[in-house]
Image (cartoon, rainbow, N blue to C red):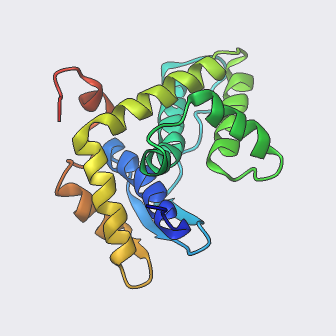
Amino acid sequence: MKLKQIELAAFHEAGHAVIYHILGRRLRYISAETNGEGMCMPMSDRPIYFEDGYSDLLHNEMRELCLISCAGFVAEAKTKWGYVKPEIAYKLGEAVNGIFPDSDYGNVRQKLEFANNLSKSDFFNYTFFEEMHKMTVKLFEKSIVWLAAIKLGGKLLDSKDVSLTGDEVHAILEEEINWGAGIDKFLNPEVTT
């Protein structure tokens, strides 16, 4: 079955929304367009922690940023192909960085570079991105996370204007996953669903 652009966009945005929800970050809205574009708009973007040098806070913020950014593409790819290798995603970010700087991967690459400048290191590099991408894939391999994304994508497609408010998104997801449950809960080997 060939999926339409709007369907891929809906599952892409649902992927972002699920991770925002798990992290306990409120959304303003999500939407999908017939041309394959979409938006998952948080209530506010947290700034990257402005402190010279590496810190646990900076590491955690970059981890969350990568998970959120990877989630859209991982959910879309899982819907369409089943899986996408992290090196393809990273190269995609490299390719679109100058052309589409606001794309998920173009945006995350810029912020990783900024974090490296801030921390005066090269810690936030491809290896870090690859680890975060694999972590995102692992999250979406959990049936509870994947089913929440599928359910939300379906509800988005069924909505009148292919748009849901943040409150609607969180209410739908709350039926499957507690708001703010935390990423580590789903990465724990004892969590099998």
Q: Residue furthest right?
A: 98
Residue shown at 24% from the left, 30% from the top: 185
Res 183 quadrant in image: top left
Q: Residue furthest front?
A: 1
Q: Position of residue 128 (x, y in %)?
A: 57, 21
Quadrant that contains the C terminus? top left
Residue shown at 59% from the left, 37% from the top: 48
Residue shown at 45% from the left, 51% from the top: 16
Q: Position of residue 134 (x, y in %)?
A: 46, 26
Q: In this view of the protein, can residue 110 be seen by the observer?
A: no
Residue shown at 44% from the left, 47% from the top: 75
Q: Residue furthest bottom?
A: 160
The foreground one among 113 and 30 is: 30
Q: Position of residue 139 (x, y in %)?
A: 34, 34
Give left or right: position of 157 versus 89: left
Above or below, comparing residue 27 to residue 117 in the picture? below
Q: Position of residue 78 (x, y in %)?
A: 43, 45
The foreground one among 53 and 30 is: 30
Give left or right: position of 36 versus 93: left
Above or below, comparing residue 183 to residue 169 in the picture? above
